[in-house]
Image: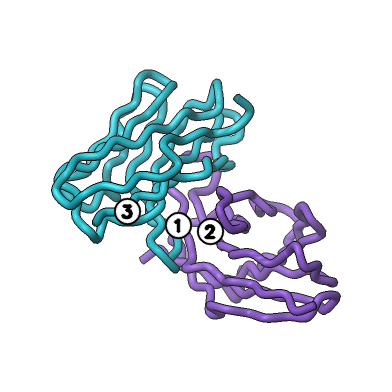
Chain colours: A cyan, B purple
Amino acid sequence: GAGVSQSPSNKVTEKGKDVELRCDPISGHTALYWYRQRLGQGLEFLIYFQGNSAPDKSGLPSDRFSAERTGESVSTLTIQRTQQEDSAVYLCASSSRDRANEQFFGPGTRLTVL
Amino acid sequence: AQSVTQPDIHITVSEGASLELRCNYSYGATPYLFWYVQSPGQGLQLLLKYFSGDTLVQGIKGFEAEFKRSQSSFNLRKPSVHWSDAAEYFCAVGPGSGNTGKLIFGQGTTLQVKP
């Protein structure tokens, strides 16, 4: 596709359950980012992948959060034992090597933890 | 500490009026600066960016922004607002010199447009 895609668009889960959120970056983009946007807030950085380098995990809020990326392709953000404070929109972005500072965002996954 | 401040949480302007959204940043190195717009139910769309050179940058949808190093500001302007500009606007800073890395976002400014 032409842009970054994310699935599901909406996810409702019960407290304590695990969830997986998926991101498909723009084809050929080497860098991939995950951000979290709580209601009425700006975006908080979670994790960043760049090619085969070790990811920058400095934004992950707890060890319940993890993410993987297969090569320069799909990424999955996993939240284990979800809590109500995890409710937010999770946004994925990607950028290319030659325009490294321009991040293109997906539509996000709205996660609601009941 | 690295941070972005958007002092105005909500702004309401009349259609056809001019607009200025404020953004101040704190960043150790020379940053790259961005404005994004988020319409309801939509992802973030890049309006414009400043990397270097001319401090007045033009973006899409008739927006422009001016980088003022001495004031650590990057305010967004539009001469005449349209009803379709109602949205949330985010200022962000990122690492300069072609480096990849996280963006630091402000809290956002919600723009309402009165008919």
Residue A74's x, y, as percent? 41, 24
Discs 2 and 1 share one subunit: yes
Q: Is A42 positioned to the left or the right of B61 in the image?
A: left
Residue B106's x, y, as percent? 49, 66
Query: In terms of image quadrants, where is residue B66?
Result: bottom right
Chain assignment, label 1:
B
Residue B61's x, y, as percent? 79, 56
Say which amino acid is labelled 3: Thr
Residue shown at 80%/77% (left/top)? B115
Give the camera-side residue of B82 and B26: B82
Q: Is residue B79 above or below residue A37?
A: below
| Element at label 3 | strand
Say which amino acid is labelled 1: Ile
Chain assignment, label 2:
B
Query: In terms of image quadrants, where is residue B97?
Result: top right
On the image, numbered disc 1 is attached to which residue? B104
Chain assignment, label 3:
A
Residue A27's x, y, as percent? 55, 22
On the image, numbered disc 2 is attached to which residue? B92
The residue mark sitting in front, 1 or 3, is: 3
Q: Is A92 positioned to the left or the right of B51 in the image?
A: left
On the image, numbered disc 3 is attached to which residue? A112
Say which amino acid is labelled 2: Ala
Give the camera-side residue of A20 and A63: A20
Asked if disc 2 and disc 1 are in contact, CB closer than 8 Å, the reply is yes
Give the camera-side residue of A89 and A74: A89
Residue shown at 75%/57% (left/top)? B57
Asked if disc 2 and disc 3 are in contact, CB closer than 8 Å, the reply is no
Neighbour class for label 3 at 10 Å: few (<14), some, many (≥20)?
Answer: some
